[in-house]
Amino acid sequence: MRKISPESDSVTGLASQVPEALYAPRHSVLVRVTHWIHTVSFIALVVSGIAILLAYPRLHWGETGTLGTPSLFDLPLPFVLDLGIRGPGRYLHFLAAWVSLFTGLVYAISGLCTQHFRKDLLPRESDLRSQSILKVALDHLRLKRPTEEEAQTYNLFQRLSYLTVIFFLYPFMFITGFAMSPAITSVFPIFVNIFGGFQSARTLHFFAANFLVLFLFIHVAMVILAGFTKRCRAMITGYSTARKKLS
Amino acid sequence: MSDNISRRNFIVTGLATVAGISGLGIAAKIADRYGLLAPDHEGIFGVGEALTYGAQRILMSHHSLVREFSRSEISKVSPVNHGRPHYDPYERLLSGNFADWRLYVDGLVARPTAFALADLKRMPSRTQITELNCEEGWSYIAAWTGVQLSFILHLVGTSPKAKWVVFYPFNDFWGSIDMPEALHPQTLLAYGMNGEDLTPDHGAPVRLRVPRQVGYKNLKYIARISVTESLKNIGDGNGSAAPEIGYSWYGGI
């Protein structure tokens, strides 16, 4: 392997061709790896979650609820009991939840250590000026494609929605999930008591999952708007443009 | 040079994979020794099961009691998914009000015993108002009365080698629980529900009540209980009929 130093001719030559390749990647290796593992586990959780939900697509509030008792909300979905999707769905749901938990912990701990959250996700002072907020809002309303420069950082809406997902919706999914486990609540009854009962926790788990799916749709739509190939490449290789081999 | 790198990469990746797999194998052995390995731990889904069961077993090892509710919270509706077995021996016992029913307790015990329903009812009873959570999503609260399974196990004298308690009901849905679950104070052999005898559809004469696990672990129509050291040669070795139809053996969620 050849050593690369700023003085090296070949590097100066390359720099004029693909300058971006010499800078820090748009996304760190850790963010890229956890992003895609998480993509897989999230899709698995949604699909298996639907398989579980379809056994009883009614939502209650409080501790208990069955057929023959009033519901909070009857989802316009069929009761699917005989298809054999729920057993494997449950196995998959809890396996994917473990993957999601481990990935999430690695991401969260490293994000705190590297100050990724503080530097890249916490809104900057300049983001919070009314003029800047207005510009971002108008850009979104007009579905304006971000410039390559704008795509190098997150805008205010991205920052706020990512922070909400990472520090509120995700932990909330886990806590409402724990609240539905009779084993976990036998040790920590607080998990279920703060929601006012098992059925309330189940209902909240469902609605929070809907917000996450909504987030996914908007996220993918925005990626398409910003240039699907470039943005995906940035999340895979770290760079939004094709990279020349350095050696 | 790059050949060297790829060879090094190859060796490192290979070693890491071997270390990873043997590490998992060792972890599984250790987990098994401490009673932390679910019987249905094989296959890709088994990884999730092994993690869930192991983690919850450790979590529950110190203090773990499900919530008990007040009389006013008892649900008016208590649905049943699978009603009584239409099976001759069961129906004959039912028509005789279970006078001829015996609960056979055998396996790794000092004194294998057959208990009549009246015997169970003479033992110290416990009534607990707990929630039954069906894996489908619905739940209800009821008062269950019965004898603690630990009481029966002490009577028959389980061997120190015993690790699992297997339940054989009058239908095909057999199952098992581990020793800590069997000895847990809230684990009952219930013969009463909401102040009356258990109805046939709710599992008469006796059902297992393990409130720390979801509904389907609370086996109904129990005929025989067997204490064992290993589940390997029972059924297909997964500890219950549930994995055969795609459900996990462990139901703590």
Image: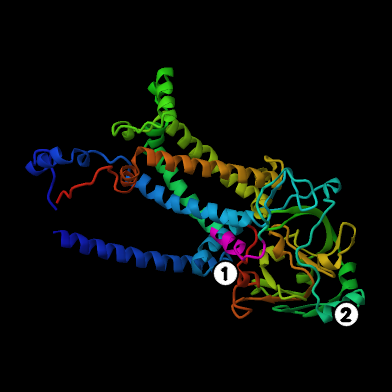
Name the spot of residue B19 as percent of width and height, x first. 37, 65
Quadrant containing the C terminus of chain B is bottom right
Mark 2 lies on residue? B92
Circle 1 crowding by C-alpha within 10 Å: few under 14, some 14–19, many from 20: many
Q: Residue at point 43% right, 21% down?
A: A134
Quadrant assignment, res B122: bottom right
Residue sitting nearer the eye, A59 or B115:
A59
Q: Is residue B92 found left or right of A133 in the rendered image?
A: right
Name the spot of residue A34 as percent of width and height, x first. 40, 48
Q: Which of the two marks, 1 or 2, is nearer to us in this view? A: 2
Does the image show residue A152?
yes
The amino acid at mark 1 is Asp
Vertical relation: A130 (above or below) A62: above
Mark 1 lies on residue? B40
Magenta segment, which residues? A81-92
- What is the distance, in whole Å, between disc 1 and disc 2 at their CAs? 35 Å
Marking on residue B133? none
The amino acid at mark 2 is Arg
